[in-house]
Every structure is written in C-alpha cells, then in structure tokens.
Image (cartoon, rainbow, N blue to C red):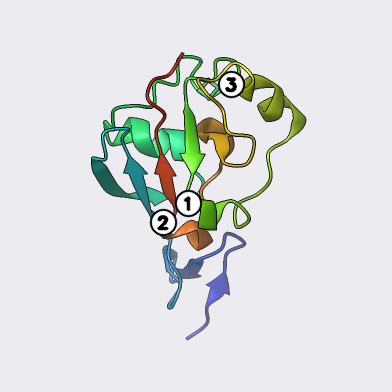
Amino acid sequence: MKWDWFDQPGLAKHEGKYRKREGTALMAKITYVEHNGTEHVVEVASGLTVMEGARDNNIPGIEADCGGACACSTCHVYVAQDWVEKIPAKDDMEEDMLDFAFQPDPARSRLTCQIKVTDDMDGLVVHMPEKQI
Ligand code: FES
C-alpha cells in the first residue's frame, strides 16, 4: 500500500481519495463569544477565514460588510489573550483598517477576514465587540 502525500497539511491521498491524515485535524474548533457572553463553538475548515467560519455558521456579531476585502472593519474581534501570539501577526493594511473599528484594542483586536484558519488554531477563542461600526 502506497500513500501519496498531498501538500496540504492534514491530507493524504490513498487510492485516488483524499483522507484525513492520522493524528491531524482538517478543522479547527473556534469559539466565538458574543458581547453578551453567548458562546458559539463551531468547527471551521482549514483554509477558510475566521470571518467565513462565523458567516457560514450564522453567528451574530460579525457583519463583514465588505465580504472579506479588508475594507470595512465590521469583522472586528478581540482575540483571547492567550491566542494573540499564536496566530499570524496582522499586516499594515489590517492595522490601518482597525483604526476604523469600534473601540479597538491595540494588542487583541483583529479583523477576522484576515485570519486564515489552520488546524493548529484548534481551540481559538475570539470575543465580539459591543457593536461593529
Ligand atoms: S470583512 Fe470587511 S474588513 Fe473584514
């Protein structure tokens, strides 16, 4: 039996079909916490953005008016403190757009459309602001 490893993390091709590589996750469990404390725990596929995970699961509080183009800041969240250093840093465009978000926190604020989910984000927690602008 020969395994043909596919270049995407967590996927392996075997007999023409892609399968989950043992011991890896193709999904990350993400907890979205509304401003009122309501938690939504959903599985988001690697490769989607944290914003798309919210949109696809009808989670309120992330509006994403520009559809993920980093042009509206209505997908703003506060990343849980223990995750701030674990996710890729924001670039200059995201940093600039966060200036237009509601009550941004320089350390924890992120635009969810700019965070691409990977399987090592399993357990990520994000908190919604009181409102989106
Ligand atoms: S969806 Fe508009 S900035 Fe993220």
Of mark 3 and mark 1, the one earlier in the sequence is 1
Query: 9 or 30, which is in the foreground?
Result: 30
In percent of width and height, residue 89 lies at 69, 45
Q: Which mark is residue 46?
A: 1
Label 1 residue SS: loop
Does residue 16 lie above or below 48 as drawn?
A: below
Query: 84 or 71, which is in the foreground?
Result: 84
Query: 26 or 97, which is in the foreground?
Result: 97
Q: CA distance from mark 1 to mark 2?
A: 7 Å
Please, which residue is most extreme toward the left here? 38
Does residue 31 lie above or below 62 as drawn?
A: below
Residue at left offset 52%, top offset 78%:
3
Does the Cβ of the disc 1 residue fall within 8 Å of ligand 1?
no
**What residue is pinned by disc 2?**
28
Of mark 1 and mark 2, the one earlier in the sequence is 2
Of mark 3 and mark 2, the one earlier in the sequence is 2
Q: Give the residue type at disc 2.
A: Ala
Residue at left offset 43%, top offset 18%:
132
Observer-side mark, 1 or 2, equals 2
Which quadrant of the figure has residue 90?
top right
Q: Which mark is residue 69?
A: 3
Please indicate, yes or no, whether residue 62 appears anywhere in the rendered image: yes
Which quadrant of the figure has residue 16?
bottom left
Label 3 residue SS: loop
Residues marked 3 and 2 touching at CB (< 8 Å): no
Q: CA distance from mark 3 to mark 1?
A: 19 Å
Does the Cβ of the disc 3 residue fall within 8 Å of ligand 1?
yes
Please, which residue is most extreme toward the right here? 92
In percent of width and height, residue 14 lies at 45, 72
Query: 66 or 33, which is in the foreground?
Result: 33
Q: Give the residue type at disc 3.
A: Ala
Residues marked 1 and 2 touching at CB (< 8 Å): yes
